[in-house]
Amino acid sequence: MSAVASGGKSFYGARLGLLVRPTRFPRLPGDPANARSFPFSVRYAVLERADRACALEAAERLLDEGAEGVGLAFNAGFDLADALDAPFAGALDADRGLVEAMLPHDAELGVLAFSGNEGDIPVTGYLAEAAAEDADRLEVPRARDSIVEAARDAAAERPAIAAWLLHEPEMGPFAPDIRAATGLPVYDRVRFLARFHAGLAPRAFPR
Amino acid sequence: MTVALGGAPIGGAALGILMLDARFPRVPGDMGNGDTWPFPVLYEIVQGATPERVVRQRAEGLDGAFLDAARRLVDRGAVALTTVCGFLSFFQAELAAHAGVPVASSTLMQVPALDRMLPPGRRTGVVTVSRESLWDDHFTAVGARADTPVEGTEGGRELTRVLIGNEPWLDMAAAEADVTAAARRLVARCPEVGAIVLECANMAPYAAAVRRETGLPVHDIYSFVSWVHSGFADAHRPPVTGTID
């Protein structure tokens, strides 16, 4: 490694740019819109509106400032991978395929979603309502109970479920609770983004 | 809750690693070096699975040995399994069915997921320890395109010779030069490559150098398996409270 450092931009070490929606919902650790969810620095851009045009403009600004890849901290109905000159972590579908590929053929991935695609497990109750209303207060134990109960019920109903994918960013903070309650591994948007970031910053091992 | 559930001789969310029957050096960053991992791992050697046999002879006749070793790891308490060789992708379905836990047989599994995150016209390329030994079915077994661009280190000075030849010494600087040179050749030959996957589980020590030299995202077995383990990791983390910061 050279002993001469190269500059060229204003700040360093925040490689992942993350687009967040303009909401007021409390973003607990485990939600990608809480910076403490990650063991590395991220650079946030708060969108004026959660639409494609706004997101594209913000993503380009993040890249211009020095981000090396951009991701979404929420589920959007659009993708930016076809419009950016850098890798883009958008839909969780990439993880859906990857987790499914690891499981035995007769096992299922349980996708917990507030309002999901066919095959997803619809989660209703307190957490779903608070997220939908963009409530600025959240009773955390009540939120935890509502999502854990949904996971328990789904596991009882579909014993082939061997892993979870939490489709909503608001579910991430309760991943440990879902794992503890069901014994199954849990994947979510924070984990997806951490893997994406690892490609931008491969670990340097001691020699 | 103060009642604990048992069920296996070893507790903790340990990752089970199926090891080759080899003696070449396992440097920091290599899967077979315990210091590489920030979480517990369980190792099991697959008897007879020499690098030569697994890479050059498609692990022929070793199915039973791999499946038995996978079962032993799960019986001891492994919550997920991986292997130390990207060429073992064609055992994915068999291993997962036999082990009954999530299996990440090969870093090649990441290729389809990465392809969809890249700019238009870009795709994932692979750097391997032996290009001629990486066949179509190594890719298709894990849902990757058979025509995925590949470049190998076999023309280099150090890494392939030491690994496949199972030699006792490794010049890490020369090994790094082999890997970065292969990555540069890959990008020169296939400019559409927008991310690199390192097939070989012994290449993670050089991933940062490949990223530095190519400017492309680099995904290796270390980051892949760290993600796999993260699904199991924090069952015992204190639950989140109302404190946000």
Image (spheres, rainbow, N blue to C red):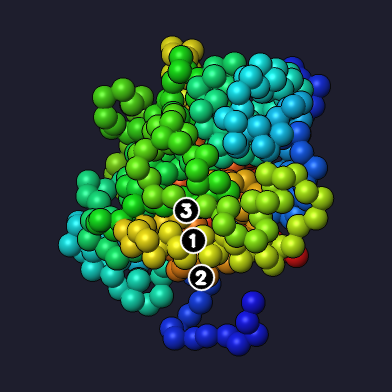
Mark earlier in primary sequence (2, 3): 3
Q: Position of residue A123 (x, y in %)?
A: 36, 28
* Chain under numbered label 2: B
- Left or right, residue A89 beside residue A47: right
- Looking at the picture, tell me which residue is in the foreground, A80 or A178: A80
Marks 1/3 same chain: yes
- Left or right, residue A95 beside residue B132: left
Q: Residue at x 17, y 62 (%)?
A: A53
- Looking at the picture, tell me which residue is in the foreground, A44 or B132: B132
- Looking at the picture, tell me which residue is in the foreground, B193 or A178: B193
Graded by Cα atoms within 10 Å as few (under 14), some (14 to 19) or many (20 or more), the crowding at tag 2 reads few
Mark earlier in primary sequence (2, 1): 1
Task: Identify the image quadrant of residue A115.
Answer: top left
* Chain under numbered label 3: B
Question: Do tag 1 and tag 3 residues touch (Cβ < 8 Å)?
Answer: yes
Name the residue tied to disc 1.
Answer: B183
> Tag 3's secondary structure?
strand
What amino acid is found at the position of numbered circle 3 in the picture? Answer: Glu
Distance Cα–Cα, label 2 vs label 3: 16 Å
Quadrant that contains the N terminus of chain A: bottom right
Q: Residue at x 74, y 27 (%)?
A: B48
Query: On residue B232, which mark appears?
Result: none
Query: On residue B151, which mark appears?
Result: 3
Distance Cα–Cα, label 1 vs label 3: 7 Å
What amino acid is found at the position of numbered circle 1 in the picture? Answer: Ala
Q: Residue at x 27, y 63 (%)?
A: A84
> Tag 2's secondary structure?
helix
